């Protein structure tokens, strides 16, 4: 092992070590003192189990113990697997070649270091962990009698525990970390501890893991740089109109409604992968809603306010800017859900023609099967969340970010724990992770309504189940043509759940399924030559039946959408931002999107 780590072992200077540790101790004391002071000043009661995990695990344990024979059988199976592992390891130590008892799944980057395979001890540690992890998860999944929500919660948090206990997450059982520690004389751990303290300071006592080099990016300078102007703004949003790159444009403007859980520039990261720039280059007059990052003064803003001050206000502004009363709308994720509500609202008001067509990216409308996000939806958790929001007036963006990061904990939490805190490295500059870290707050009233009426009660699919600005929302009244894009590996808006909209509206829906996930499947420019997508013109009730009859197309879905969205729309001279009745307020991307939580 020592030879594999190299002969040059650095011994750290005791004086330097003492100085570093003294500084760390002083910073730690200050951070803890400030954190405790904030906790003492917070009037909001704190639950010992805000995620309501305890009851689910108590019930799971009771049901598991009620069938001791089944549990004993599982224990014997684990024992047999370990016997095979011990025998294989012993044979390897004697120089034989053996097949592993347990292998990491394809794409598991925790064990990418060659020592996990080449060194017998680390290979044993790896396989031992994999056997135990799969056994624990298998035993939990096999427990019978749990209701669906409790079973999902137990499975999810068991996986969180199993992921946290991976040997790659500990100094003494990660060969890469051990090697770095020996070679640097422990400087990696000191640097890592300083990185940890930096993250705690930035998060004001809460761990805010740095996923990328924040100094490498600046909104409006090297990301979100497509030229344009802010032409309208109100309390909740700025409306950005982009500068045309073609002499003529499609007569009907394109209005993009992004989610306000994240910032809109996921669609405008870099010129090479910007959907916004690409749409401009195809001849669209593109308008994008850039949502405000709300504070306590907007606590009472409702879901209806987001509709009125978002897409409805944007429609009026676009008409003033271009003279066009009708647009093609694009809604992404939560922005898509709002777009669907807006379609139903306009239909009820006799103004359905304000939106000639709607494109929906990864949009949930039927929340009966919301995927793993359903783990966080029950009365106890929602009540605790509302109690927390009542004090601040909003949901902290860091809380929302942690929720999404937990869905992919190995990639979005533990890989950075190892890189930043154990290896003592700075994270790599990555535009997507910069955007992912640029979290936003949720106004208390709006967020409570959204979680309860949609996720908990699934009222959006009930005619009149949701009332916005005095109007009953009924999806069945929607006759607007819809292009609906979902992604096959989406862990936030599962495609089979999004597919339900095809059955719930009255108008034509072109459903398209793209490869990859919630972000990569959407942001997939044609020039990248990546992935594929599936289409099927048949309107069938079952999503699996739809996929079985679908045609696979190679590459990006963007050209397919362009052909659909531009069909039958005539060309007019290009419109410059600020040339209509609305004058330019400031350059794109505007001020709202530049406000960071941390």
Image: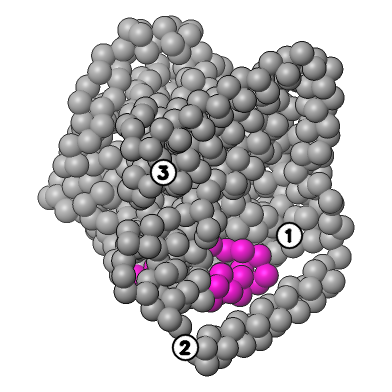
Residue at x-position 32% and y-position 62%:
3
Number of residues whose C-alpha sits closer than 10 Å to that of mark 2, classed few (under 14), some (14–19) or many (20 or more): few
Which of the two discs, 3 and 2, labels the residue nearer the N terminus?
Answer: 2
| Residue 210 sits inside the magenta stretch | yes
What residue range appears in magenta?
A: 193-216
Which residue in the structure is indicated by mark 2?
13
Residue at x-position 45% and y-position 83%:
12
Closer to the camera: disc 3 or disc 1? Answer: 3
Quarter assignment of residue 60: top right
| Residue 523 sits inside the magenta stretch | no
User: x%, y% of residue 521?
Assistant: 34, 36
- In the image, 215 versus 80, the foreground residue is 80
Does dot 1 land on a helix, a strand or a loop?
A: loop
Closer to the camera: disc 3 or disc 2? Answer: 3
Number of residues whose C-alpha sits closer than 10 Å to that of mark 1, classed few (under 14), some (14–19) or many (20 or more): many
Q: Is residue 228 above or below residue 357?
A: below
| Gap between marks 3 and 1 measured at Cα | 55 Å
User: x%, y% of residue 290?
Assistant: 45, 56
Does dot 3 land on a helix, a strand or a loop?
A: helix
Judge left or right: residue 587 versus residue 78: left
Q: Is residue 211 visible?
A: no
Badge number at residue 120: 3
User: x%, y% of residue 397?
Assistant: 60, 57
Quadrant of image for the C terminus: bottom right
Q: Is residue 274 above or below residue 463?
A: below
Does dot 2 land on a helix, a strand or a loop?
A: loop
């Amino acid at each position: 092992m020592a030879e594999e780590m190299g002969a040059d072992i650095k011994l750290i200077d005791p004086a330097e070590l003492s100085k570093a540790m003294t500084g760390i101790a002083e910073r730690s004391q200050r951070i803890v003192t400030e954190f405790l002071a904030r906790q003492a000043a917070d009037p909001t009661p704190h639950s010992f189990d805000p995620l309501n995990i305890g009851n689910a695990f108590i019930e799971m344990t009771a049901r598991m113990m009620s069938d001791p024979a089944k549990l004993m059988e599982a224990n014997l199976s684990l024992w047999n697997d370990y016997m095979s592992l011990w025998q294989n390891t012993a044979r390897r130590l004697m120089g034989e070649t053996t097949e592993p008892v347990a292998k990491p799944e394809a794409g598991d980057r925790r064990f990418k270091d060659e020592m996990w395979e080449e060194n017998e001890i680390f290979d044993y540690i790896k396989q031992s962990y994999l056997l135990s992890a799969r056994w624990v998860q298998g035993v939990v999944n096999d427990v019978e009698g749990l209701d669906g929500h409790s079973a999902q919660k137990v499975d999810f948090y068991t996986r969180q525990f199993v992921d946290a206990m991976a040997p790659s997450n500990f100094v003494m059982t990660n060969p890469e970390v051990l090697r770095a520690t020996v070679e640097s004389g422990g400087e990696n751990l000191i640097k890592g501890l300083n990185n940890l303290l930096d993250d705690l300071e930035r998060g004001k006592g809460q761990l805010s893991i740095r996923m990328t080099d924040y100094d490498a990016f600046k909104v409006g300078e090297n990301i979100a740089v497509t030229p344009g102007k802010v032409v309208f703004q109100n309390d909740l949003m700025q409306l950005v109109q982009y500068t045309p790159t073609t002499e003529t444009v499609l007569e009907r403007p394109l209005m993009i409604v992004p989610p306000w859980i994240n910032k809109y520039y996921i669609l405008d990261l870099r010129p090479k992968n910007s959907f916004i720039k690409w749409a401009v280059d195809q001849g669209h007059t593109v308008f994008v809603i850039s949502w405000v990052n709300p504070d306590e003064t907007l606590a009472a803003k409702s879901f209806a306010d987001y509709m009125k001050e978002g897409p409805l206000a944007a429609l009026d502004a676009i008409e003033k800017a271009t003279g066009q009363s009708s647009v093609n709308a694009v809604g992404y994720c939560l922005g898509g859900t709002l777009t669907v509500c807006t379609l139903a609202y306009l239909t009820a008001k006799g103004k359905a023609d304000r939106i000639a067509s709607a494109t929906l990216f990864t949009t949930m409308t039927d929340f009966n099967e919301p995927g793993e996000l359903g783990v966080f939806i029950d009365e106890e958790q929602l009540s605790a969340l509302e109690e927390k929001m009542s004090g601040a007036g909003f949901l902290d963006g860091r809380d929302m970010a942690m929720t999404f990061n937990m869905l992919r904990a190995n990639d979005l939490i533990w890989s950075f724990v190892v890189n930043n805190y154990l290896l003592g490295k700075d994270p790599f500059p990555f535009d997507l992770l910069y955007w992912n870290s640029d979290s936003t707050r949720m106004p208390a009233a709006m967020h409570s309504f959204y979680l309860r009426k949609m996720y908990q009660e699934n009222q959006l699919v009930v005619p009149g189940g949701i009332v916005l600005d005095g109007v009953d929302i009924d999806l069945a009244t929607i006759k607007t043509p819809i292009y609906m894009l979902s992604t096959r590996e989406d862990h936030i808006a599962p495609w089979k759940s999004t597919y339900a909209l095809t059955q719930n509206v009255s108008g034509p829906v072109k459903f398209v399924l793209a490869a990859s996930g919630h972000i990569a499947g959407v942001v997939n420019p044609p020039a990248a030559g990546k992935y594929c997508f599936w289409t099927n013109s048949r309107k069938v009730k079952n999503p699996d039946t739809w996929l079985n009859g679908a045609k696979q197309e190679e590459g990006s879905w963007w050209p397919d959408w362009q052909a659909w969205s531009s069909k039958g729309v005539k060309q007019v001279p290009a419109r410059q931002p600020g040339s209509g009745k609305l004058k330019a307020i400031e350059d794109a991307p505007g001020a709202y999107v530049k406000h960071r939580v941390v």
